Every structure is written in structure tokens, then in C-alpha cells.
Image (cartoon, rainbow, N blue to C red):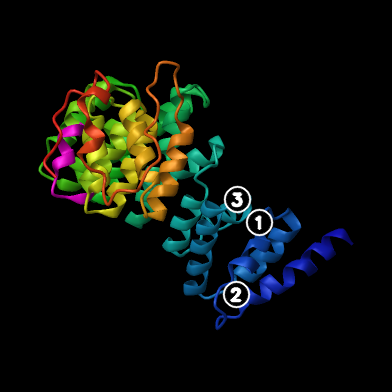
Amino acid sequence: MIAEEIILDLEPALAHLRDANATLSPALLATFSNLKKTDLAAFAKTWLTLPAERKSRVARLFAELAEENARLDFTPIFRHVLNDPDARVRVAAIEGLWEDQDPALAKILIGFLRNDPEAAVRASAAESLGRFVLLGEYDRITPTLAERVYNALVETFRNSSEPMEVRAPALESLGYASRADVSAMLSEAYGSDDAAMQTSAIAGMGRSADSKWCSIITGELDSPDPRMRFQAVHALGELECREPVRRVIAMLDDPDRQVQIAAVAALGRIGGKSAKRALTRLIQLDDEVLSELAQDALEELTFSEDDLPLLAVGEPSAELDDELFDEDELDESDSSEVPDR
């Protein structure tokens, strides 16, 4: 009787799925969070009746909802649709399982990476395997599985017949591995003539936890390609590179919005007096998005006893100007030149 009541509660949402003319409702789709086995069977029966386009939109919306709301868990559904005939659904399922650390999933992803006919699915699998590389670094999976994951990614990166959209995320995932071979691969990729591979090399450097890459990454802040600038700023934050903090602060005025957002997050990871002052000033501006992100970044920082006090709250300025770079307020490590702006 309990199972029947649960299925009955799902019926409006299942009917909504079957109605191809209905605009998908996030509220109704949220009903499918944390499904039990009996509920999943009811969902699976309905899923088989849906047109491919409807399934694709539903799977994508499930992934978006799970990313936006941590309380929603569609793991049973994502696992069920992993082998859907539609590549778009398989991609959404892989992305939806981004927090799943089950070793069995790693084996499935390796299978996708090596055998799926669609490049988009192989690329998504390559990206998703990155967390298992990291789990291997922390001995959270068996050495045997960690080696299988590593070898599959290396084979993909070395496979010249694979499109760049698959090889590039494989390299980024390898960035988590603390192996000399990976360092060589990152250098090789960065020295290539392919812009996408160069960008992925920077992303991989950021994941390496090796500060030796800081100077190379800093040089890419001047790249004309906003995708490269984004990855460079993000990588400097991941590595917590302190020396180029003024350069990162200057990226808050970058013409590309995503680069600005990445700079806020990076400053929250890098820390230090200059980063804190820049984030504090940013909170006072009329940019609601960046202001909220700056507040979040500040909350993540650990304030040491010898830190200088934050700038006093005053009138918001139109932009982050050179006032932030007062020499007598900068950390001793902030020795780089302020870029022309």
C-alpha cells in the first residue's frame, strides 16, 4: 500500500512527462528526486514512451536542477538513463552524476571513453573521470582502479585519431595526477599549435597542485582569447599563486563577464591583504552578481592575526582602480607590475 501511495503521488509528474505539448515544470520534475526502486520502475515505464527530443530536454533539466539545488538527488534516474540510445541523454546523465564516487561508475565511464560512438559522450566521460584521478591521489579508490582510470585517459590523450574535444578534457583530468609523465604531457600540449589544447593544458596545470606552473599561467592573462584568460585566472586560484595577485585583481575589469567571475573566485582562494581589499571594494559596487560572489569569497578566507584591516566601507567607486594597488598596502609578495588598463 505504501508503494502504491508513492506511485500515486508521482502520477501528476509522470503525466506531465507524457504530455509532449506541456512546457517542462521544474517543480513537477523535482518530484522525481530520491526515487525508490518502485518509483523508479514507474518512471522507467513512462521514459520508454517519451520521444527522443522530450527525453533529451528532461534529462538536461534534471542535471540543471541538481546543480542548482543540493537537496535534489536524481542519481537513480541518471544511472537508469546512462545507456539511453540518445547521446544527449547519456551526456546529461554523466554530468548529472558529477558527485557520484562509486568505483563502479568509474568503470562505466572508462567504457564510455573507449567505446561510445559519439564524441560528445566520450568527452563528457573524460571530464567526469577527473574526480576519480583525484580520488586515486588520496587513496580513496584501489590502486588498480586508479591505474585503469589513468591509463584510459593517457590512451585517449595520445590517440591522434580522437577529436580535440575528447583529448582536451582527458588532459585536464590527468592534471590531477602527481606523475612526471603528466607534467611532460602538460608541457607538450601547451607547446602545441592548437589553441584548445593549449587552454586545456593551462586548466590541467591549475589542477596539478604544483606552483611551478604559476609564471606560465600568469602570462596567459594577457591572451586575446577570453577562454584562455578564464582558464588562466581559474588556474591561478586553484594553485593559490600569491605573486600575481595584482594581475588577478586587474582581471576584475576584464571585458569578459566569465573572466570577471573567475577572478572573484580566484581571489577568494589566493587570499592575502590585497585580495581582501579588492573583494571588499567590489562588494560596494552596484554590480549585484559580482558583489554577492565577492561576499562569498570573503567568507571563505581565513583572516590571520597580522592581516591589515579591510578597507573601510565608503562610497562605491565606478570601477576597481589603482587605489587598490597602494604600494604601502600591498603584500611583500606582490611584486609584479600593474598591467595597463
Residue depicted at x 17% and y 38%: 220
Query: Where is residue 83 shown, x and y percent of the image?
Result: 51, 56
Which three-letter amino acid code belongs to the residue tagged 1?
Ser
Which secondary structure, mark 3?
helix
Query: Where is residue 17 shown, x and y percent of the image?
Result: 61, 73
Residue depicted at x 47% and y 64%: 85
Mark earlier in primary sequence (3, 2): 2
Mark earlier in primary sequence (1, 3): 1
Q: Which residue is mark 2?
A: 49
Q: Quadrant of residue 128?
A: top left
Of circles 1 and 3, the one toward us is 1
Q: Which residue is mark 3?
A: 75
Which residue is nearer to you in this view: 226 or 283?
283
Which three-letter amino acid code belongs to the residue tagged 3?
Thr
Neighbour class for label 1 at 10 Å: few (<14), some, many (≥20)?
Answer: some
Query: Where is residue 4 shown, x and y percent of the image?
Result: 84, 65
Give the Cα separation between the discs numbered 1 and 2.
Answer: 20 Å
Q: Quadrant of residue 191?
A: top left
Identify the disc placed on residue 42.
none
One can see residue 159 in this view: no
Q: Which residue is mark 1?
A: 33
Give the Cα separation between the discs numbered 1 and 3.
Answer: 8 Å
Most frequent secondary structure within the magenta stretch: helix
Neighbour class for label 3 at 10 Å: few (<14), some, many (≥20)?
Answer: many
Mark earlier in primary sequence (1, 2): 1
Of circles 3 and 2, the one toward us is 3
Which residue is nearer to you in this view: 328 or 79?
328
Region in magenta: 217-226
Horizontally, residue 224 falls left or right of residue 178, namely left
Residue 341, magenta (yes or no): no
Horizontally, residue 224 falls left or right of residue 149, namely left
Query: Which residue is situated farthest in the right direction here?
Result: 1
